[in-house]
Image (cartoon, rainbow, N blue to C red):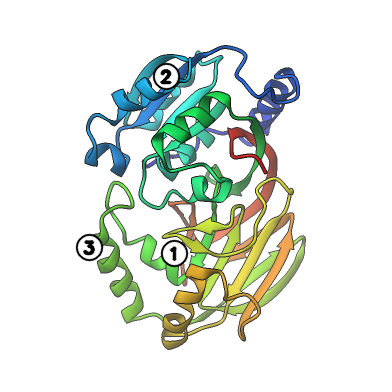
């Protein structure tokens, strides 16, 4: 789902989320009401592969004892409309893009997730099951918990990223990807090959908690969750610790090919040319050499990042 931010710079939305969390009396194991709003992302790859998934998910939620109202949305505006009066738990049926959109809606809610995307990084990071029946039971009975987000600030706009931020090779490839969701393998290969053909590492200005340095990168990740992009295990990030995990990889084309399998397994940290830091604020200036990608949204070459504690209330598996 392509979205643009509707969140202003005042920070009022996270305050409303925290207020709602506080009123929920220590995160009860069950919702205050069994009446749930099931919001399906019409752009999610799982829905296109399984047309009955909305009805099937509603049936599974009802089988656990919930009363369910359903909505199918295809834009942030439609999601805003669905959430405008959602004083109950909202169950998102979709992939990572569903939560990206929810984080940037003008209206907050307590969310649960039934994974129906391709990468499903958020579900994997939070231990949300992929079995639809188990995910539905967790959505009804699970404990909501506060999840941080990343404020991505430019002079023109502000956006809340859920998974992370990227600059370098991945960002160059992602900016050339034009499919509606992450399931188009051919489009992904085309974008990757196009970015790889002319890629060379470059120097960026990187600020961590106000300390700025020039760093040569082939790839930079700023992670809020362990998984990012096409299932890359970029960092041991905890989305509730109030910190951002910053990983730089100094690698050219040949070295990037070698480190890609390690990124899948999460074994790249500690390798030559790889650094890992944690910070509360991050400033990135790529000097025109790369866009910055926040989740899947493309920005220019300069962004200011900061942690937004407790930006979302989201049901996840018990720790």
Q: Earlier in the sequence, mark 2 or mark 1?
A: 2
Between the residue at mark 2 and the residue at mark 3, the CA separation in whole angstroms equals 39 Å
Residue corresponding to mark 2: 63
SS of the residue at dot 1?
Answer: helix
Q: Earlier in the sequence, mark 1 or mark 3?
A: 1
Q: Nearer the viewer, mark 2 or mark 3?
A: 2
Let me know if residue 108 appears in the view: no
Q: Is residue 292 above or below residue 270?
A: above
Quadrant (top left/top right/bottom left/bottom right) for the C terminus: top right
Between the residue at mark 2 and the residue at mark 1, the CA separation in whole angstroms equals 42 Å
SS of the residue at dot 3?
Answer: helix
Q: Is residue 17 above or below residue 9?
A: above
Residue corresponding to mark 1: 171
Mark 3, Cα crowd under 10 Å, few <14 / some 14-19 / many 20+, is: few
Q: Which mark is residue 186?
A: 3
Q: Earlier in the sequence, mark 2 or mark 3?
A: 2
* Residue drawn where x is 45% and y is 29% of the image: 136
- Camera-side residue of 68 and 60: 60
Q: Position of residue 26 (x, y in %)?
A: 75, 24
- Camera-side residue of 244 and 117: 117
Between the residue at mark 1 and the residue at mark 3, the CA separation in whole angstroms equals 18 Å
* Residue drawn where x is 52% and y is 42% of the image: 128
* Residue drawn where x is 70% and y is 74% of the image: 213
Quadrant (top left/top right/bottom left/bottom right) for the N terminus: top left
């Amino acid at each position: 789902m392509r979205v643009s931010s509707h969140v202003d710079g005042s920070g009022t939305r996270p305050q409303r989320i925290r207020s709602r969390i506080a009123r929920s009396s220590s995160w009860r194991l069950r919702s205050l009401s069994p009446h749930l709003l099931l919001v399906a992302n019409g752009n999610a790859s799982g829905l296109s592969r399984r047309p009955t998934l909305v009805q099937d998910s509603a049936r599974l939620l009802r089988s656990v004892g919930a009363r369910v109202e359903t909505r199918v949305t295809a834009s942030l505006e439609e999601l805003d409309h669905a959430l405008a009066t959602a004083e109950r738990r909202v169950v998102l049926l979709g992939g990572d893009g569903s939560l990206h959109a929810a984080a940037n809606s003008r209206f907050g809610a307590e969310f649960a997730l039934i994974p129906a995307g391709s990468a499903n990084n958020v579900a994997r990071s939070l231990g949300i099951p992929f079995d639809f029946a188990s995910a539905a039971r967790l959505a009804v009975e699970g404990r909501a918990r506060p999840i941080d987000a990343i404020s991505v600030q430019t002079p023109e706009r502000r956006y809340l990223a859920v998974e992370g931020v990227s600059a370098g090779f991945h960002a160059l490839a992602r900016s050339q990807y034009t499919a509606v969701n992450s399931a188009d393998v051919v489009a992904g290969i085309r974008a990757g090959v196009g970015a790889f053909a002319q890629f060379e590492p470059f120097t960026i200005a990187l600020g961590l908690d106000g300390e700025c340095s020039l760093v040569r990168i082939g790839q930079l990740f700023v992670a809020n969750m362990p998984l990012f992009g096409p299932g890359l295990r970029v960092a041991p990030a905890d989305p509730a610790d109030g910190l951002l995990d910053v990983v730089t990889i100094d690698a050219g084309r040949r070295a990037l090919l070698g480190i890609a399998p390690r990124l899948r397994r999460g074994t790249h940290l500690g390798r030559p040319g790889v650094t890992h830091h944690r910070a509360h604020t991050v400033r990135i200036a790529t000097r025109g050499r790369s866009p910055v990608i926040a989740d899947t949204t493309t920005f220019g070459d300069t962004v200011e990042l900061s942690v937004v504690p407790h930006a979302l209330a989201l049901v996840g598996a018990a720790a």
